Amino acid sequence: MTTAVMDPNRAPVAFGRRAVPQLFEQLQVQDPAHKVRALTSLCDLVHEPERLYQTVTGGFLKQLQVLLQDEDAAVRSKTCELLQLVMNHSIGRSALLASSLLTPLSDLMDDPSASCRTNAHRVLSSLAQQPAGAEALLSLVHKLMLKLCQLEKVRQEKQEEEQELLLSTLTSCSRLDPLPALASDGVRVLGQTLTHTSPSIRREAAAALMALSVPADGKQQVCDQGILSNLLVLLHDRNLDVQTNTAGVIMNTVIIRPGKYLCLELGVIPVLLELLSEEEDEEQKKRRKTLVIYCLRALTALSEAPEGRVILSTALPLLERRRNEQDEDVRRAARTAIKVVTWKP
Amino acid sequence: MYTYSSHPKPVEIRKYRDLPDPSQLQYGNIMYDRRVVRGNLNGQQVISKNNHSDPGMQQRQQAYRRRAIARKQAKDQLKTKTPEAIQGRQHVDVQTDSFLEELSNIIQVSEMDCQTDDFLDKPSTPLFVPAKSGVDVETQIEEGDLFDFDLEVQPVLEVLVGKTIEQSLLEVMEEEELACLRTQQRVFQELRNNELAEVQRLEEQERRYREEKERRVAQQKEVLKKEEETAEKIAARVFSHQYLAGLLPAVFTALRNHGYFYDPVEKDISVNFLPWLIAEVNNQLDKRYAAREVLDNIIYEVTQKRLLEFTHLMSGQNSCCDS
């Protein structure tokens, strides 16, 4: 490849089938700059599915394990990047799970170099998207929680991305099984994270809370620790995703009775109604669809309580309007809401 | 400023037999004098300059030594000396002058020195240009003689650009695919969340209804039980009323029947007086009976005695009669 000759950052790549094996052989050399160049070329190559397949089936991933514990930070960070590209395909993901790369990866989370940590988090986060991966990572949840506590105590700018990725990993794991995260006092830590300045972190924290509030224990904790007032503030947030996730948490929490009454006290209903009543155009509708559905479900749960029913019976026309919308899911949700509001014992 | 008794002078070397200039001293650098021992003298073994291992050399050396001795002896013989002292006398060296004067050949020395200017650089040697030889030839490349750059560069460029674009297309496609997957996943997650919330709400509702029902049923049972109890209580009350209603006259009647209501005088008479009366009457009667009894006893005794006496009499009479 001519680019290899011209680009000093990349090692030269052999032709055809020899490309990947030869680059891996070059990785055996002790010189770190050499290794970085070889890794960069590998990153370029691995985008192609054929090469990826070759990498995975050739059993080269074991070499990467040694590289993950290398002394030079650039080498480690590049290896993580390579792993992340490998994760883009399912065959890579299953290979990663089968190999024993998880332990060095989780050790890399405490690495002194920031880019290394970020890349390691990226790998873990994309691994967690798959259910088998999330299952494998469940044992790490406790450690992830501790890391999150640490990051919360020291709020720095460059650690934002790391925190975001960490939170998304937690969310994916908790969707599968929220119990380990709940056991590690997740609700309290996430409650603190909700007040972070960066919107992406708030969004991820709210998503994680939504996953955690699915079991009854989580709901109880959310009510007990007074996170609902924070959530109410977040409902007024400008970022749509943050609003959506917050509405989701509220939707989960109001299912239990203490949640209902707390929300009624805090006056959540008017806010939700306001969110529903906003006029939208076509493309905004698509984006806000989830928010609308969550609001409707939350209102449905709130109207199980008699006081809620009283308040919501005045808002029936709004719900009627939603019922006549085009989207099937929104219609269904609105119908259920109306049914519950107009129920007489 | 130093003053010397004798001025320092360099060590002479007498290398040449004839001095080139008798007024000039030939002196050498003492540092490079072979006669001077250099270095550390500790443990330095004295090497005799006559230490030759070669026997021929040794013989030659001995011959030299012998000849030298012989020469010396010959020389000594030729040398005129002062005659020997006569017997009884001694030769003595005497200095006539009062001041000693050194006889030496003082060579008048004058020094001259010369110094070049500060670091005058040696000018660079001019280029050695050999004399021209050979035939002059010249050539000129015209416009179209060599390759046409634009034509030739095209395939190279194509490859370069092609590879880059291929790579970037791959990456873009990958990203798009990933984005698609992510969107799908997100949509699925949202639906799942929704349905999960719905399921939980319905569960909760079910639970509440069930609890409500149970509570109502329990309440109903309570009510029934209470009613039963009340009915029982009422029945018991009525019965006891009835029972107790006839109780009082029955009691009174019974008491009266048992004689608990009495006339006190009558009672007193019957209880106290009459028994006493009867007891007294009994006593009297007893006394009479006792008296009668006594009387009876007396009469009986008397009669018995009389009977006895009569019998005795009778018998006595009989016996008297008989006799």
Image (cartoon, coloured by chain):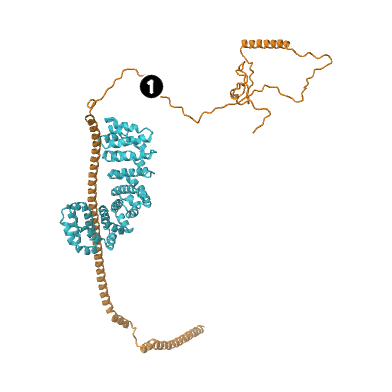
Which quadrant would residue A67 be assigned to in this image?
Answer: top left
Q: Nearer the viewer, residue B80 or B223?
A: B80
Pick the residue in front: B130 or B283. B130
> Residue A323 in the image: x percent, y percent?
16, 57
Q: Amino acid at mark 1?
A: Val
Tell me where residue B310 appears, x and y as whole percent: 48, 85
Q: Kindly indicate the quadrant of the structure image that contains residue A107.
A: top left
Viewer-proximal residue among A308 and A204: A204
In which quadrant of the rendered image does the C terminus of chain A lie?
bottom left
User: What residue lies at 81% left-to-right and 17% top-to-bottom?
Assistant: B90
Vertical order, B115 against B74 (above or below): below
Q: Is residue B48 above or below residue A188?
A: above
**What colour do you see for chain B?**
orange
Q: Which residue is mark 1?
A: B129
Question: Could you tell me residue A283's position as x and y percent?
Answer: 19, 51
Count the numbered circles shown: 1
Q: Quadrant of the N terminus of chain A?
A: top left
Q: Is residue A145 visible?
A: yes
Residue A314 screen position, x and y as percent = 19, 64
Is A321 left, or right, of A260 in this rendering?
left
Q: Residue at x 18, y 53 (%)?
A: A329
* Residue farthest to the right, as pictured: B88
Tell me the shade of chain A. Answer: cyan
- Chain containing mark 1: B
Secondary structure found at label 1: loop
Question: Is A304 or B101 nearer to us in this picture?
Answer: B101
